[in-house]
Every structure is written in structure tokens, then in C-alpha cells.
Image (tube, grey):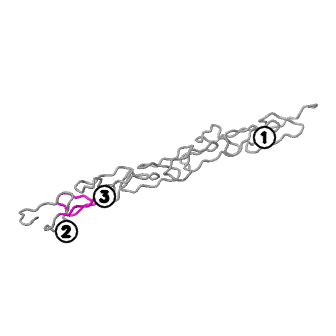
């Protein structure tokens, strides 16, 4: 109260009697704090809240899911790409996404890389990468897997499994087609992961065969 005053004046919102001395003026609260009428202290904005208008006379604002605020904050900080507010609680820090997942800014969940894509750079802050032809992946993959010898990515869709080649054909790793054994060669072991072999003299076969046929006498 001032000299000669006949009544006490309460500190206004945004101010506080920090020294609890009625002979001194009320002190303004700093940004990141708030106070109501007649306060003797400035209350810091709690975890998950922020003094968005930097006005201590108004209540601290609750931060939206996908963001975080420490005590005494004046801003709500959105989760960066590669992190997420998994519990939807702005009072807890954002959580890094695992490899095989990705997230955008201010995300509330980590999205798994879809089948046919993979987190090739192991960086959840970047989008998942499309697998190349001859390679496939499942859900939340960190790598694209090559089709092994004897199989092929016949539909050129990395989201579907590699297909087995049939007997009489051959394929190397990471291919999109099964190659028929050429005429004069056979898939003698009926194993499309091994090379086709040459028929011996005196025998013949068309392409994609598993056995050599003897030439007829006189031919």
C-alpha cells in the first residue's frame, strides 16, 4: 500500500508480492510464468504448458499432442521428424522412432515402412525408400531382400514375395524373370538355382527342358 493509503491494494494478475513486503511495489512475473490477483509468487508454466502470449496475467496454454514443453516454457516445441509424441502427452519428451519406421514433424505416431519399402538409411526422419526390382520387403523393414537364385520378382512388385522358378528354367539373384534353359541345354537337376548344363553329343532338346533326348539313328 502507498503512504497515506487507507486500504491495501492487491497485486494485479501478472504481478506478485515476491518479497512479501506490503511496503514495496508488486513485481512483474517473467515470461513462462503466471499469477492471479493478490499473488505472492509467480507460478511457472507446468510441463506440457506454455506462456504462448508471454503475458503472465493470462493462464498458461496447454500444448497440443505432437509437441512438448518443459517447465517455464513460452513455446510448444513440435516433435522433430523422426520422433513422435507416442503417448499424446505434451508433458513428456518426444520419443525417437525405431529403424524401419518414419515420422513427420509434430507426429503422434511412428509409421512403419510399408511392404515394398525399407528404411535404407536407418534414419526415421527421412521417408521410407522404395525397393528396387528384384528385391522385396515386408512390414517395417530396414533393408530390401534380394530374390535368391532360383526365384524371381515376376510381378516386379517389391511388396509381394519372390516367386519360385519352375524346372527347366534358371535365375540368378535379384532378377525379375526366370530364364529358360536354351535349346541344347537342360536343367538336369530340376533346380532353377543352378546353371543349365550342356547336352552330350548325340542328344538334343528344345529350350526349357530337364532331359536330353537321344538323336534318332542317322540324324
Label 1 crowd (10 A; few <14 / some 14-19 / many >=20): many
**At numbered mark 1, what does the secondary structure look like: helix, strand or loop?**
loop
* Picture coordinates of residue 98, whole percent (x, y): 50, 53
Q: Does the magenta stretch include residue 22?
A: no
Nearest to the observer: residue 210 or residue 73: 73
Name the residue that disc number 1 marks: 187
| Residue 209 in which image quadrant | top right
**At numbered mark 2, what does the secondary structure look like: helix, strand or loop?**
loop
Q: Of tags 3 and 2, which is closer to the observer?
A: 2
Distance in Å between CA atoms under marks 1 and 2: 95 Å
Look at 45% across and 53% down and name the residue there: 83
Look at 76% across and 41% down and name the residue there: 190
Region of the chain picked out in magenta, as a range: 26-46
Q: Of tags 1 and 2, which is closer to the observer?
A: 2
Q: Is residue 43 above or below residue 64?
A: below
Name the residue that disc number 2 marks: 19
Name the residue that disc number 3 marks: 46
Q: Is residue 182 above or below residue 75?
A: above
Q: In this view, does 185 lie to the left or right of 32?
A: right
* Picture coordinates of residue 86, whole percent (x, y): 42, 51
Distance in Å between CA atoms under marks 3 and 1: 73 Å
Amino acid at each position: 500500500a502507498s503512504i497515506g493509503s487507507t486500504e491495501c491494494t492487491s497485486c494485479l494478475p501478472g504481478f506478485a508480492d515476491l518479497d512479501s513486503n506490503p511496503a514495496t511495489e508488486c513485481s512483474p512475473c517473467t515470461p513462462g510464468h503466471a499469477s492471479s490477483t493478490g499473488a505472492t509468487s509467480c507460478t511457472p508454466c507446468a510441463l506440457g504448458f506454455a506462456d504462448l502470449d508471454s503475458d503472465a496475467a493470462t493462464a498458461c496454454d496447454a500444448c497440443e499432442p505432437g509437441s512438448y514443453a518443459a517447465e517455464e516454457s513460452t513455446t510448444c516445441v513440435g516433435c522433430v521428424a523422426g520422433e513422435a509424441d507416442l503417448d499424446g502427452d505434451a508433458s513428456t519428451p518426444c520419443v525417437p522412432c525405431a529403424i524401419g519406421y518414419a515420422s513427420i514433424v509434430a507426429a503422434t505416431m511412428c509409421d512403419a515402412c510399408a511392404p515394398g519399402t525399407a528404411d535404407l538409411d536407418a534414419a526415421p526422419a527421412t521417408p521410407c525408400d522404395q525397393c528396387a526390382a528384384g528385391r522385396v520387403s515386408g512390414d517395417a523393414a530396414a533393408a530390401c531382400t534380394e530374390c535368391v537364385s532360383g526365384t524371381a520378382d515376376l510381378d516386379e512388385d517389391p511388396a509381394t514375395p519372390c516367386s519360385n522358378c519352375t524346372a527347366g528354367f534358371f535365375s540368378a539373384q535379384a532378377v525379375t524373370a526366370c530364364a529358360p534353359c536354351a535349346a541344347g541345354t537342360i536343367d538336369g537337376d530340376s533346380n532353377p538355382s543352378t546353371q543349365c548344363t550342356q547336352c552330350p553329343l548325340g542328344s538334343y532338346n528344345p529350350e526349357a527342358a530337364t532331359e536330353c533326348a537321344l538323336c534318332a539313328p542317322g540324324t
